Image (cartoon, helix red, strand yellow):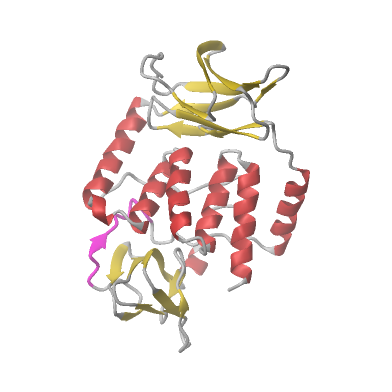
């Protein structure tokens, strides 16, 4: 499988989707990128199997056991993907024997750890302080915000604490109004008959909620349309990914690579959607909540970031 060069996976405002130093990374052999059905994990030296969660780091000697009709996919540090099919037990070694797929070294380098930075007690205390001081706006924009877009027809989405009779969405560029529209809903699609968005340009938008006697503005936020070269690179990598995974094979691993591709191109809105999809399938995975916390922080969704990171810490305390 060939993809565009991945210079990094994620950077985050609160916590990072971390790259380990070689001293730490050398002990970690693989990570679970797909868990379908009942998949269990026994750590090295243990005879007891417990539930295996998406994103779990794997070490030499760990054992993966799959029930009938279940499946696990392991991404190894040598950039190979291995599938453990139903009714099998596999002992993790230093490399993937008979890997069904290979990931180019331009995608994931050998010293990249796909598990996540773990929030310590001090960080959780800081997050708690942020939560206590956090005030929700009457209207909060959800997307697109602080992200790049791989489309010139975005869907504008927001949340409202108080129901308004009408919302006006205003899009600006270079200090002038480009487009505006009204809706009673909390989202609206940029229509085909509106002015085309220009590749590489930065746009600003806000929502105004209106009642008979009152009006309220959201914050003014920005997004950027990918440049022509970036769009071509993104679309080429996406086409290669889609060619590698048939529509009926697009499970956790596909979503993981898609989300990583989107994050690499700073298409954070798309990356959030990809990992939210995984989180719905694997709500007990601390790793996916940590990823989402990092992505939410990246786009300024602080309340969502705090909630996700605290959920990850809660799940890890139960391990």
- Place of residue 172 in the rendered image (x, y in percent of width and height, measured from the top left): 53, 16
The answer to which of 224 and 159 lies nearer the viewer is: 159
**Residue under the point 59% across and 68% down:** 316
Quadrant position of residue 192:
top left
Judge whether residue 99 is colored magenta.
yes
- Residues rendered magenta in the picture: 98-108
Q: Which part of the image, by quadrant, shows the C terminus?
A: bottom right
Percent across and percent down for residue 297 are: 59, 44
Left or right of 100? Residue 11 is: right
Q: Is residue 227 above or below residue 283?
A: above
Depth order, front residue of 279/202: 279
Residue at 68% across / 32% down in the picture? 162
Q: Nearer the viewer, residue 22 or 230?
A: 230
Residue 243, percent from left and from top: 21, 47
Q: Is residue 96 above or below residue 172?
A: below
Q: Is residue 309 left or right of residue 64?
A: right
For the stretch drawn in magenta, the main secondary structure is loop
């Amino acid at each position: 499988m060939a993809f565009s060069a991945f210079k990094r996976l994620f950077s985050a405002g609160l916590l990072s989707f971390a790259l380990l130093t070689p001293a730490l990374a050398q002990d970690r052999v693989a990570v679970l990128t797909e868990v379908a059905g009942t998949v269990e994990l026994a750590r090295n030296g243990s005879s007891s199997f417990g539930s295996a969660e998406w994103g779990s780091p794997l070490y030499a000697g760990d054992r993966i056991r799959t029930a009938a009709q279940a499946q696990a996919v392991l991404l190894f540090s040598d950039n190979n993907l291995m599938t453990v099919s139903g009714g099998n037990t596999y002992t993790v070694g230093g490399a993937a024997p008979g890997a069904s797929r290979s990931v180019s070294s331009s995608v994931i380098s050998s010293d990249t750890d796909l598990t996540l930075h773990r929030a310590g007690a001090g960080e959780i205390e800081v997050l708690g302080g942020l939560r206590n001081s956090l005030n929700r706006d009457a209207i909060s924009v959800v997307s697109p915000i602080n992200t790049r877009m791989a489309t010139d027809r975005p869907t504008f989405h927001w949340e409202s604490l108080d129901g308004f009779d009408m919302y006006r969405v205003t899009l600006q560029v270079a200090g002038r109004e480009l487009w505006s529209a009204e809706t009673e809903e909390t989202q609206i699609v940029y229509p085909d008959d509106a002015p085309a968005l220009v590749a590489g340009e930065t746009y600003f938008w806000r929502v105004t909620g209106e009642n008979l006697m009152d009006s309220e503005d959201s914050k003014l936020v920005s997004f950027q349309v990918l440049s022509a070269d970036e769009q071509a690179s993104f679309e080429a990598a996406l086409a290669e990914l889609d060619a590698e995974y048939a529509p009926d094979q697009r499970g956790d691993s596909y979503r993981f690579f898609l989300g990583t591709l989107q994050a690499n191109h700073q298409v954070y809105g798309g990356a959030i959607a990809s990992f939210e999809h995984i989180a719905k399938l694997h709500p007990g995975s601390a790793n996916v909540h940590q990823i989402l916390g990092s992505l939410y922080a990246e786009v300024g969704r602080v309340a969502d970031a705090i909630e996700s990171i605290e959920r990850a810490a809660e799940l890890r305390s139960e391990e």
